[in-house]
Image (cartoon, coloured by chain):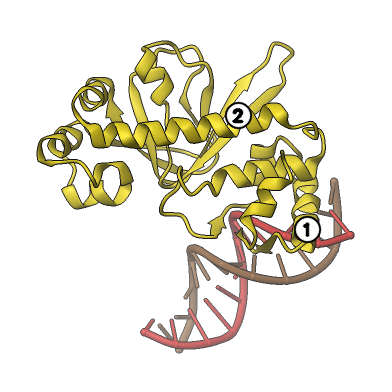
Chain colours: A yellow, B brown, C red
Amino acid sequence: MIDPNRLRRIAAWSRPLDGAAFERARAGVTERSFARGSCVFVQGQRFDAWAGVIEGLVKLCRQSRDGKEITYTGVHAGGWFGEGSVLKGEVRRYEVIALRDTTLALLDRASFLWLFEHSADFNRFLVGQLNERLGQFMGLLESDRLRDPEARVARALASMFNPVLYPEAGAHLVISQEEVGLLAGVSRPVANQALKALAGDGVLRVEYGGLTVLDLERLRGYGG
DNA sequence: ACATTAAATTCGA
DNA sequence: TCGAATTTAATGT
């Protein structure tokens, strides 16, 4: 069974839980590693666990009929995803790909539902998370500049700096420009240009193998 | 696609 | 264990 301190470290939601709920979470969490490029969850498969990224980076995406791929969002260390599919007990509507070597924590469906039924603290976290995602998707709908690479990159990044979804994350993120491109749905060179433009506006700073956000509000503004 | 530069790794003392 | 040399990864155009 997972060490209690490790669980607290990798799962912000576990920290407010009381003794019984915390033990239930402890019993339900397992860890699993995925190689870069591998598929974590297949679209259409029945999904039975809620997942959190301990280390690495995954993207949630969907193949449309004409073969084009739509990336919903990227999830990096500290982020949890899949609550929708677990709650509704329905098949996955999207697939999850590891963009680099990644370790996930998995909370099995039975434990998730138990916490959902018995823990107000757990529900508080869930509601906050769902609300934040709703806001993200409403922003997506409003956006009229989805074709502009700068806006796409800005949106992809802004979602990864969401302070509710990533309570631990600072302003710095380790991510290559290739990974930015995969998340934003643009080529690596285009991602490079977009990042440079954003850096020129003083919204962020690009570094080797990563970037630092200087003005999150303005970064958000690029998309919606 | 190619050239450049940063970082990680290996190897020899 | 230190640092130079080599290899790998990321960036810029």
Q: Amino acid at mark 1?
A: Lys
- Image spot of residue B12 (x, y percent): 48, 80
- Confirm or deny contact between disc 2 and disc 1 (CB under 8 A): no
- At 30% from the left and 42% from the top, the residue drawn is A13
Q: Residue at x 71, y 35 (%)?
A: A185
Residue, disc 2 = A137
Let me know if marks 2 and 1 both belong to one chain.
Answer: yes
The residue beneath circle 1 is A196
Q: Is residue A215 left or right of residue A102?
A: right
> Which residue is painted at 68% across and 24% down in the image?
A69
Q: Chain of mark 2?
A: A
- Quarter of the figure that contains the N terminus of chain A: top left
Which mark is first along the chain, 1 or 2? 2
Amino acid type at image mark 2:
Phe
Circle 2 sits in a helix, a strand or a loop, which is it? helix
The C terminus of chain A appears in which quarter of the rendering?
top right
Which picture quadrant has residue A105?
top left
Q: Chain of mark 1?
A: A
Q: Is residue A224 visible?
A: yes
Q: Position of residue A31 (x, y in %)?
A: 29, 38
Q: Position of residue A28 (x, y in %)?
A: 21, 30
Q: Secondary structure at mark 1?
A: helix
Q: Give the spatial CA distance, label 2 vs label 1.
A: 26 Å
